[in-house]
Image (cartoon, grey):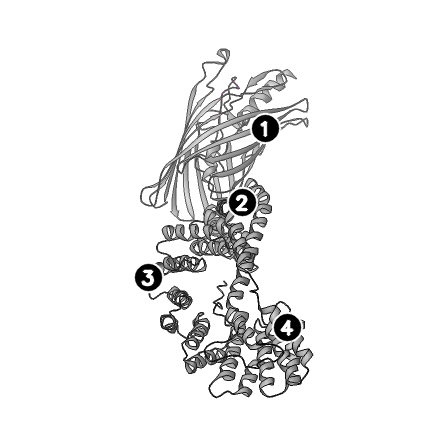
Amino acid sequence: MVLRTSFVKKFVLELAVASTFLFAKATDTPNQYQQNDWFAEFGGNTSMYVNPAGISETDQLEFSAAIFSTSSSDASQEYVSLTFPIDYKHTLGISLFEKGAPFEDGESYGEIAAQFGYAYRLFHLLSLGVNLDVLYTNQFNEKDQLKVNADVGLSWNPLASSKYGYLLIGVAVQNLLAPIVDEADDAYKLPTNLNLSLFYRGFNRLLEFKAEFSILDLIHDSKDGKGCDLEMSFSLTYYLFPHLGVRARYTKEGNPVLGATVNFKNVSIFRYLALDLEMSHDDLWAKKNRGFVWAVKLTTRFGDTREEKIGEERYRRLMIEPEKDYHAAESLYLNRQFLEAAYAFGEIQTKYPTFRLVDQAAFYEAKSFEKLRMHKAARVIYRDAIKRYPQSDQLAKYHFQLMNINYKEGKYKEAMAIYQTIAQKFGKSDAKADADYVAGQIKFEQGLYKESIDLHASIPPGNANYLYARYTMGIANSRMGKFDEAENCFRDITEQPVSNQSERDLQDAARVKLGHLFFSGEKPDIAAAARMYGLVQKDSPVFDEAMLGIAWAFIKANKPDEAIKYAKWIIDNLPESFLVSEAYLVMGYCNYIKKNYQDALEALNQAENRTEQPIVSVASRDSARLAYDAMQSQLDSVQVFALDLANQLPTPHVESKRKAFRSTFDKVYKVIEDYATFMQRAIQSDRFESNRKRILDDIGPKPMPRPRFPFPNNSTPNEDSSISLEDDL
């Protein structure tokens, strides 16, 4: 048994494979191992057991299988390998080797080795690779062993061009752990080897040259010889055609090899398919008792290339993902979730700084804060965007929004200074019409009606500001006594097509103004006025004024019972309306006409009581302003903090900060909204002042009222110059 085992060991060790499956020389020093360069060489994508860093050159998913055998097939070795590039930097690989030697009595010696490799591209030209090797041996069914080993390697690619070719240089250390393999009558340690490799492809991809130098058994036992043996191999492949090449090789075992390679591209499911055949004779230099030997290798590549995957990932990251995130942010904005929209648009700018819509994301981030009445944060974003995107199509809009914020805050001087910048630098932009409209509103509120009309007149039909500009022009002309011009402006509004609820409301307001003009003109047309009032929709914000106008029209037509119906409808259905007091006045007149003096007196008393004092007193207004000013520092700090959160990526830590911040934000936002609502009512109260005096004069000394009709030529009731463009997305 000992003799047979000794013979088998020599025979098996000639076939090779421990850890990296190496062929052994026919000597009595089993620690002298060299690489099996029949299966792969450095430069091949599945050369993991030559140098683990070599698989970093894999361009797409690649599978290869090979077999090495003697002519009698008494001894053979099989090999399969799979490499998978994850992205530009990372590559995984797995190789499986099997070899065996059967004997006549049914016993056999077999080895199976598995390698798990990983390569990482340190830099564009340099890669690092490591292998974990697992070796299993079965010695004649008498002794099973499992050994673990490791390899490490570097791969350097200093040259890669169509002109000069492709050069790859590598160095690797095999068998770092150098495990000991026990045999039936002996034991040996797997040697630690140093491999130096070179691969070159050039001359328009016609020629491939490979060279390998191995220093074997770097760390050796003195009883096993001096170690550090040098072995080398060379290979030259010349392609007769792009798909056919011939090969000559000198192996590390000292065998000359002839072979050929044939390849096909884009074959069915395979992007690349290659078949290599190599042949030699072991007895050319020394008798090894194997005779003719051959190896066949099949290589296939399929799936996306590394470049295609990276390109798709970049496209997804640079185009698809930002587009998707932008539309999600846009949806939040349209659903009036303005804080969430600000976060989302801020994330786009931070995460995708080269995205094609990043300048629009900045615009709508600021608009989101502006919708929240957080002008401090909006100003910061607009000013920053002017600096960051000087070539943007949004540049004029950034300036306009700063102008608009100043207008909303009553800073007319600052707003008009920005208007001059827009007029000079962005005179042909869409923002110029917006700026003209706001500048016209400023002039209107300053009482400069002629200048206001001139600015609004420059806005052409079809522009989003056109209807709103015409409305202000109508009011301005009315105040200047130009009633024909005012009528033309209001009539123009009623004849234009509308696209949203705001414009429909504006048309109703224009109809009411036309009704007032017809009612109070030098030649009153009560029927025309009533028709205009009757066209106003029930859900319109000026429906109460239209109903009141119809009531006055019935009084004018001496139909008090009909007039009472409309006045009572206002009182019953719109108790918070500013026109309730005048509705009582109408009822007083109607009952007086009907000689129901007691009812008339009660209605007139109601009208007087509701009219004598301003709806929003000066004291309550001052108190609200003082309370709001006292909170200004807190309001500012909340805006700054919200802006800071909006400009950060939504990491778990940032998300937790946003969640904790929400309650504070909601409290502050409620204060801002409540104050804005109060001030809007105060403005409406101020606008009612002229009507309040008129109503008190109309009531006169009771119980004998003086039934004067409303809407004198120099004023219109409930005149509202605040209707403005809804700046929706």
Q: Which residue is mark 3?
A: 420
Disc 1 crowd rating (10 Å Cα; few below 14, some 14-19, many 20+) is some
For marks 2 and 1, give the one nearer the viewer.
Answer: 2
Amino acid at pointer 4: Asn
For marks 3 and 4, give the one nearer the viewer.
Answer: 4
In whole angstroms, how far apart are the C-alphas of marks 2 and 1?
43 Å
| Mark 4 or 1, nearer chain start | 1
Where disc 4 sits, the SS reads helix
Q: Which residue is mark 4?
A: 605
Where disc 3 sits, the SS reads helix
The quarter of the picture where the N terminus appears is top right
Q: Which residue is mark 2?
A: 650
Disc 4 crowd rating (10 Å Cα; few below 14, some 14-19, many 20+) is some
Q: Which residue is mark 1?
A: 134
| Mark 3 or 4, nearer chain start | 3
| Mark 4 or 2, nearer chain start | 4
Amino acid at pointer 2: Pro
Q: Position of residue 600 (x, y in %)?
A: 66, 79
Query: Residue placed at 52% from the left, 72% from the top?
Result: 693
In whole angstroms, how far apart are the C-alphas of marks 4 and 2?
62 Å
Query: Magenta stretch?
Result: 29-36
Question: Visible in this render: residue 606?
Answer: yes
Whether residue 582 appears in magenta in the rendering, the answer is: no
Q: Is residue 183 left or right of residue 226?
A: right
| Mark 2 or 1, nearer chain start | 1
Q: Position of residue 296 (x, y in %)?
A: 51, 39
Q: Is residue 347 left or right of residue 110?
A: left
Amino acid at pointer 1: Val
